[in-house]
C-alpha cells in the first residue's frame, strides 16, 4: 500500500469518526429536548391535577337573585267606599274593643268580706 | 188640707225613688268601697276589746266590749246595705234588662235593705253581750239564708246581662251585614268566601249564647255550701262566651275585608 492510499484510509476513518461523534451529539440533544418537554408537561399539568383531586373544592354558591317586581295592590271593590259597609266596619271595631275590655272577674260584685260569726265568749 | 202633708210626703217618696232609679252606680260603688276601711277599723277594734274582755272578765271590760260590739255590728249591717245599694244602682243603670226583670231584682234587694235598716235599730236595746249576740245571730241567719244569695244572683245577672248585650250587638251587626251581602250578590259579585265567614261567625255566636244560657242557669241555681264556687263557675262560662264573641267579631272583620277587596 502506498502512502496515498494510507492517507486516504486515515482520512476516511477520520471522516467516519467525526460522523459518529456528530450522531452522538444529535442523540444527546434529542434526549435532552425530550426530557425538557416531558418535565415541562409534568410541571404544567401534574400539580394542578393533584390539587384538584385531593383538596375539596369550595363550592361557590351564588345566591338566587331576588327579582322584585312591583305587584300592584289589589284594586278595591266598588263596595269599599259603601257607607253601609263602612258603618258596619266601624260598629264591629267598636264592639271588638268593648268585648276585649269586658272583665267578668269584677271583685266589687262579690260578697263583702265580713265576720259572720260574732261570739263574745270564745 | 189635712191630706196635704200626706200628698207631699208621697211626692217626696216618688222623687226619691226616681232619683235612686236613675242614679249612677259609680257613687254608690265608691261609698261601698270606701266603707270597707271603716268596717276593717271597726272590726279590729271589736277584736281588741273582745280579747281584753276575755282576758280580764271585768265589768268595765264587758261594758266596753258591749259598746264596741254594738258599733261593729251596726257598721257590719251598714256595710251590707251599701253593697246591696251598689248592686241596685248597677241593675238600675244597666241596659238589657226587661222592665219586669229589673223590677223583680230591685224588689228583692229592697226587701233585704228594708229588713237590714229596721234590724239595725235593734242593736241599741241589748244590755248584755248575750242579748247583743242574739241580735247579731238574726242578721247572720238572714245573711246566710237569703242576703248572700240575693247578692250573688244579682251580681250574676249583671254580668250575664253585660255578655248578653254584647251578643245582641254582634247579632244585629251580622244581620246588617247579611242584608248588604244580599245586595252585593244581586249585583253578580262572587262572595263565596264571605258567606263562609258569615256562617262561621253565626256558629260562634250560637256557641257564645249557649255558654251564656248555661251561666245564667248556674247563677239562678246558686244554693248551699258551694255558693261561691258555683258563682265562679258561672263567671268562667261567661268568659268562655266572651272568647266566642271575640272570634265571631274577628270573622265579621274578615268578611268586611273580603267585601272591600282588601
Image: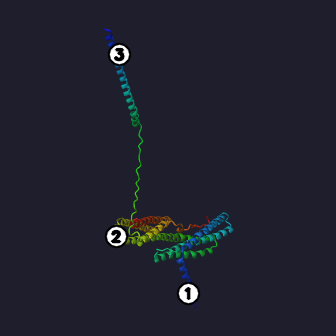
User: In this view of the protein, which residue sits in the foreground, B166 or B119?
Assistant: B166
Could you give the CA–CA distance between mark 1 and mark 2, rounded to whole angstroms? 64 Å
Give the quadrant of residue A82.
bottom left
| Whole-percent x, y for residue A48 in the image | 40, 35
Of the two numbered discs 1 and 2 in the rendering, the one whose residue sits closer to the viewer: 2
Instruction: Tell me which numbered mark, 1 or 2, is placed earlier along the sequence.
Output: 1
Question: Which residue is the site of mark 2?
Answer: B185
Of the two numbered discs 1 and 3 in the rendering, the one whose residue sits closer to the viewer: 3
Residue under mark 2: which chain is it in? B
Question: Which residue is the site of mark 1?
Answer: B7
| Whole-percent x, y for residue B190 in the image | 34, 67
Could you give the CA–CA distance between mark 1 and mark 3, rounded to whole angstroms? 173 Å
Which quarter shows the C terminus of chain B?
bottom left
Residue under mark 1: which chain is it in? B
Question: Which residue is the site of mark 3?
Answer: A14
- Dot 2 surroundings within 10 Å: few (below 14), some, or many (20 or more)? few
Residue under mark 3: which chain is it in? A
Of the two numbered discs 3 and 2 in the rendering, the one whose residue sits closer to the viewer: 3
What is the number of the mark on residue A109? none
- Dot 3 surroundings within 10 Å: few (below 14), some, or many (20 or more)? few
User: In this view of the protein, which residue sits in the foreground, B192 or B5?
Assistant: B192
Q: Is residue A115 left or right of residue A45?
A: right
Q: Is residue A11 visible?
A: yes
Q: Secondary structure at mark 3?
A: helix
Q: Residue at x 37, y 66 (%)?
A: B194
User: In this view of the protein, which residue sits in the foreground, A70 or B45?
Assistant: A70
Give the quadrant of residue A79.
bottom left
Same chain, marks 3 and 2?
no
For the residues bearing labels 1 and 2, Cβ distance under 8 angstroms: no
Amino acid at each position: 500500500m502506498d502512502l496515498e492510499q494510507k492517507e486516504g484510509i486515515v482520512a476516511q476513518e477520520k471522516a467516519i469518526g467525526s460522523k459518529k461523534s456528530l450522531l452522538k451529539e444529535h442523540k444527546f440533544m434529542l434526549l435532552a429536548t425530550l426530557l425538557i418537554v416531558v418535565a415541562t408537561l409534568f410541571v404544567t399539568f401534574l400539580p394542578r391535577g393533584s390539587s384538584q383531586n385531593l383538596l375539596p373544592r369550595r363550592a361557590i354558591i351564588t345566591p338566587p337573585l331576588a327579582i322584585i317586581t312591583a305587584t300592584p295592590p289589589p284594586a278595591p271593590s266598588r263596595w269599599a267606599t259603601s257607607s253601609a259597609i263602612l258603618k258596619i266596619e266601624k260598629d264591629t271595631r267598636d264592639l271588638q274593643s268593648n268585648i276585649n275590655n269586658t272583665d267578668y272577674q269584677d271583685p266589687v260584685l262579690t260578697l263583702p268580706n265580713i265576720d259572720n260569726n260574732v261570739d263574745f265568749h270564745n | 188640707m189635712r191630706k196635704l202633708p200626706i200628698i207631699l210626703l208621697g211626692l217626696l217618696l216618688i222623687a226619691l225613688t226616681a232619683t235612686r232609679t236613675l242614679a249612677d252606680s259609680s257613687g254608690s260603688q265608691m261609698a261601698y268601697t270606701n266603707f270597707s276601711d271603716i268596717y276593717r277599723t271597726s272590726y279590729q277594734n271589736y277584736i281588741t276589746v273582745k280579747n281584753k274582755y276575755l282576758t280580764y272578765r271585768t265589768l268595765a271590760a264587758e261594758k266596753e266590749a258591749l259598746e264596741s260590739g254594738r258599733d261593729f255590728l251596726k257598721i257590719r249591717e251598714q256595710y251590707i246595705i251599701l253593697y246591696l245599694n251598689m248592686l241596685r244602682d248597677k241593675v238600675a243603670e244597666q241596659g238589657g234588662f226587661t222592665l219586669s226583670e229589673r223590677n223583680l231584682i230591685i224588689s228583692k234587694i229592697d226587701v233585704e235593705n228594708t229588713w237590714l235598716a229596721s234590724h239595725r235599730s235593734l242593736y241599741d236595746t241589748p244590755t248584755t253581750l248575750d242579748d247583743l249576740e242574739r241580735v247579731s245571730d238574726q242578721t247572720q241567719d238572714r245573711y246566710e239564708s237569703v242576703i248572700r244569695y240575693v247578692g250573688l244572683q244579682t251580681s250574676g245577672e249583671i254580668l250575664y246581662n253585660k255578655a248578653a248585650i254584647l251578643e245582641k250587638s254582634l247579632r244585629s251587626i251580622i244581620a246588617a251585614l247579611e242584608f248588604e251581602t244580599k245586595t252585593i250578590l244581586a249585583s253578580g259579585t262572587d262572595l263565596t268566601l264571605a258567606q263562609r265567614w258569615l256562617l262561621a261567625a253565626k256558629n260562634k255566636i250560637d256557641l257564645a249564647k249557649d255558654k251564656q244560657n248555661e251561666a245564667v242557669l248556674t247563677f239562678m241555681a246558686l244554693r248551699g255550701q258551694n255558693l261561691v264556687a258555683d258563682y265562679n263557675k258561672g263567671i268562667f262560662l261567661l268568659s268562655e262566651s266572651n272568647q266566642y264573641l271575640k272570634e265571631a267579631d274577628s270573622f265579621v272583620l274578615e268578611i268586611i275585608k273580603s267585601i272591600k277587596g282588601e
